[in-house]
Amino acid sequence: MESIIFIVIAYLMGSIPSGLWIGKIFYHKNIREYGSGNTGTTNTFRVLGKTAGTVTFLIDMLKGTLAVLLPIWCGAATISPLIIGFFAVIGHTFPIFASFKGGKAVATSAGVLLGFSPLYCLFLLAIFFTILFLTSMISFSSIAVSLLGLVTLFTFPAIHFILPSYDWLFTLVVSCLALIIITRHKDNMVRIRNKEESLVPFGLNLTHQHPKK
């Protein structure tokens, strides 16, 4: 019963549409009416700018971290906090507070990793922000790091780097998160291939994207 309560809490926390609410409260804009119409970090950066985008990223990440840490702090859950954190990602992707139309799971997935395996999360974040600076695309960075995650889940334990041993549950959950992220970015992949993907207002744009105005 306690685990079910934590799962519900995780889903509800994940369902908080931070980008949507920040846009409406502080910028008097419904970001669903601009850009891609998505309520996540990428569209928030695109529509509302760096400050709103950064705050949205941090809040969305915190949702995943809290979902993992709350049952640990309370010492009450009878299932892995990683599974509970997974439901925060489901909430972020299909939020009950925003008509089940949410973000693309990147920041909240990162938050889950931060709560459960902080060193591995920091490694992936370092790669993410490096790629982001080079390409100016959150979408490309998200896809690239998700693919890297799928590879390192199997290679790092073999060489005892960051992940000291194989954990089937960790591998399964993180693989699912990576696949959700990649699947949610299928439209972005088309735009990247056509050199039309939207950019954040910084970075080098090395792939020379020219998004439509």
Image: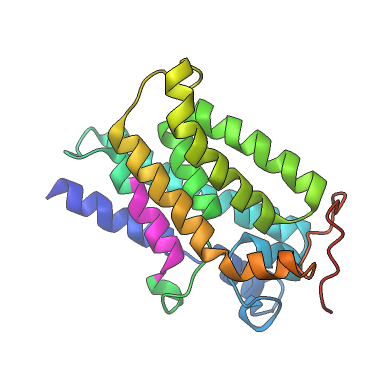
Q: Report the number of discs.
A: 0
Residue 88 highlighted magenta (yes or no): yes
The residue depicted at 27 percent of the width and 58 percent of the height is 8
The span shown in magenta is 85-95
The residue depicted at 35 percent of the width and 36 percent of the height is 170
Please tell me in which quadrant of the rendered image residue 70 appears. top left
Q: Nearer the viewer, residue 84 or 206?
A: 206
The residue depicted at 68 percent of the width and 54 percent of the height is 140
Q: Nearer the viewer, residue 122 or 185?
A: 185
Q: Give percent across and percent down for residue 175.
A: 41, 45
Q: Is residue 145 visible?
A: yes
Is residue 61 toward the left or the right of residue 174 in the image? Answer: right
Q: Give percent across and percent down for residue 206.
A: 86, 51
Q: Is residue 187 above or below residue 183?
A: below
Residue 63 highlighted magenta (yes or no): no
The residue depicted at 44 percent of the width and 48 percent of the height is 64
Is residue 71 toward the left or the right of residue 57 in the image? Answer: left
